[in-house]
Image: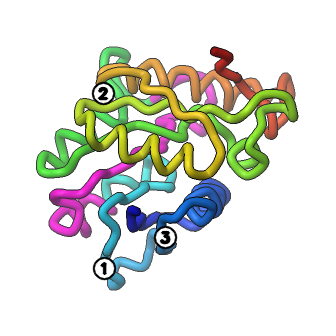
Amino acid sequence: MAHVSIIGNGNMGQAIAGLIGKGSNTVELLDQSDAARPVTGDVVVLAVPYGAVADIIATRAEQLAGKIVVDITNPVNFETFDSLVVPADGSAAAQIAVALPQARVVKAFNTTFSATLASGTVGGQQTTTVLIAGDDTDAKSLLAGIVTAAGLRAVDAGSLRRARELEALGFLQITLAAGEKIAWDGGFAVVA
């Protein structure tokens, strides 16, 4: 059993909290501006826009040391919707890992919409799959257990270097939905 803290109570934070509640894990949901409340989870999900991550790290770096930190962000240029705001050979997750060297950073949930997490299906057809990338095998395994306890599929996407591909996939999915090419309860499915 894991205790999970989610920083950010928007659509994704709420959907991930709902998933965690389906398993035997416990969850606390923190507003990103509520820096006075300490993070108590062994797993901490950053369910905020990429632009908010730097402030969270600045105020909570000590609290995040030794924890599994799950980056769900997609570093999209939301002014133009035409690019990511991280270097092509890097990722938001890699930048977070550098900023939090004592944390075990994994990338997950960024290739799913909140509606697909809540429903457990992609477009009403396939079981929602959460892709997980990271360098710590135990951290990925623990997160995969949380995901599967909620009735979803978890797939190990490889090392943290794969976060850049996950962020590119998340970016594509967001731009397709924003352009009304796919629905916000649709997206990409992984079929084994």
Which amino acid type corresponds to the residue marked 3 in the rendered image? Val
Decide if residue 91 is on the left or right side of residue 117: left
Residue 95 horizontal/vertical position (percent): 26, 37
Residue numbers of the magenta segment: 56-84
Which of label 1 and label 3 is nearer to you? Answer: 3
Q: Residue 160 carries which label?
A: 2
Q: Which of 12 and 154 is in front in this view?
A: 154
Q: Residue 38 carries which label?
A: 1
Which of the 4 image quarters holds residue 5? bottom left
Residue 159 horizontal/vertical position (percent): 30, 23
Report the residue at 62% width, 32% height from top.
129
Q: Which of 101 and 147 is in front in this view?
A: 147
* Quadrant placement of the N terminus: bottom left
Report the residue at 73% width, 33% height from top.
127
SS at mark 3 in the image = strand
Give the Cα distance between marks 2 and 3: 25 Å
Between discs 2 and 3, the one toward the N terminus? 3
SS at mark 2 in the image = helix
Q: Residues within 10 Å of mark 3 (few under 14, many from 20)?
A: many
Q: Nearer the viewer, residue 66 or 145?
A: 145
Between discs 1 and 2, the one toward the N terminus? 1
Give the Cα distance between marks 1 and 2: 27 Å
Give the Cα distance between marks 1 and 3: 13 Å
User: Is 161 placed above or below 42 here?
Assistant: above
Which amino acid type corresponds to the residue marked 2 in the rendered image? Leu
User: Is 178 placed above or below 8 here?
Assistant: above
